[in-house]
Image (spheres, rainbow, N blue to C red):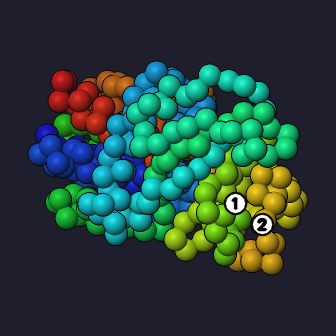
Amino acid sequence: MRCTIVGAGVSGLTTAIRLLENGHEVEIISDKFSPETVSDVAAAIWYPFLVKPADRADTWGIETYKVLERMCTEAPESGVRMRDGREYLRDITNLPPWNEDIAAFRVLEGHEIPPGYVFGWEFRAPVIEMPKYMPWLKNKVEALGGVLERGYIEDLTSLDGDLVVNCVGLGARELCGDLDVKPARGQIIFIDQDPGIGHFDQQPETLTYTIPRSDVTVLGGTAQLDDWSLDIRDEDNDLILKKVEAIWPELDRDRIIGGTVGLRPSRTEVRLEEEDIEGVRVIHNYGHGGAGVTLSWGCADEVVSIAEEG
């Protein structure tokens, strides 16, 4: 089958790899490739949180976890490492449905929970260093025979081949007229200090995280819906640091070395479905918000399944 993928972010590249591994011809067309994509600046840790539809997202997430976990030993050059993290909550809640499917999970003791929080858990999950991971994915696509072409697509029906896979993220607003897709602006800070473990408060209104990587620790965050600004704002940095210090008091502001901004492709729920557009067979795979990496391999597997069932 001749497949054309539109978009070269993490979803597009991962989908390309799975299609190539299953014997299909793949061409990726995108106006941006690594290191220019939104995926390249993601503060990426595996964590399927607040993603809809929840039942499908949990399945995609667990399948992705298994792949990323294997990469830690089979492809260390990919930049994937297993790290422990702690999620803090202000209310006692049910445990996440994936708690028995990952490498390690336990409920925190009272003395391990910062002031202002009442519950939480520790988990072991892949941290994905995107400056390494994105080039690794791109190289794998090319090694498997995939073709990468720079271009801007205005009409999915203009593409040749047996199948089009739409992985354009925010671009779906214009390409598909899908105004349900909106940016969720994320500003982050880089610091040359290792917290030992990750710290997380992933409630949208209090979003806070420290993600330790081999080169830096990523501090966040923001999730400002429908905000298109890519400028770093001092007021957001101040807010991020105050939130992080509440769960990691040892933070040393003198060791901050930079920061960046990315626009997550937010949607009320992930769009992964087939559509016939004027006789062109299209599979949509976009709208993953901040969980693009977390769901990537599971979504790619489903794209292949839909493609081959058709």
Tag of residue 251: 2
**Contact check, label 1 and label 2, Cβ < 8 Å:** yes
Q: Nearer the viewer, mark 1 or mark 2?
A: 2
At 61% across and 63% down in the image, what residue appears? Answer: 196
Q: Mark 1 and mark 2: span between their CA atoms?
A: 10 Å
Where does residue 11 sit, x and y in percent of width and height?
40, 46
Sequence-wise, the earlier of marks 1 and 2 is: 1
Residue 1 horizontal side relative to residue 52, left or right: left
At 63% across and 46% down in the image, what residue appears? Answer: 86
Examine the rendering and report whether any part of residue 74 can be seen.
Answer: yes
Where does residue 69 sit, x and y in percent of width and height?
36, 50
At 83% across and 52% down in the image, what residue appears? Answer: 246
Residue 140 horizontal side relative to residue 40, left or right: left
Where does residue 52 sit, x and y in percent of width and height?
54, 26
Tag of residue 219: 1
- Residue 125 lies, with reference to residue 215, above or below; the image says above
Q: Quadrant of the C terminus?
A: top left
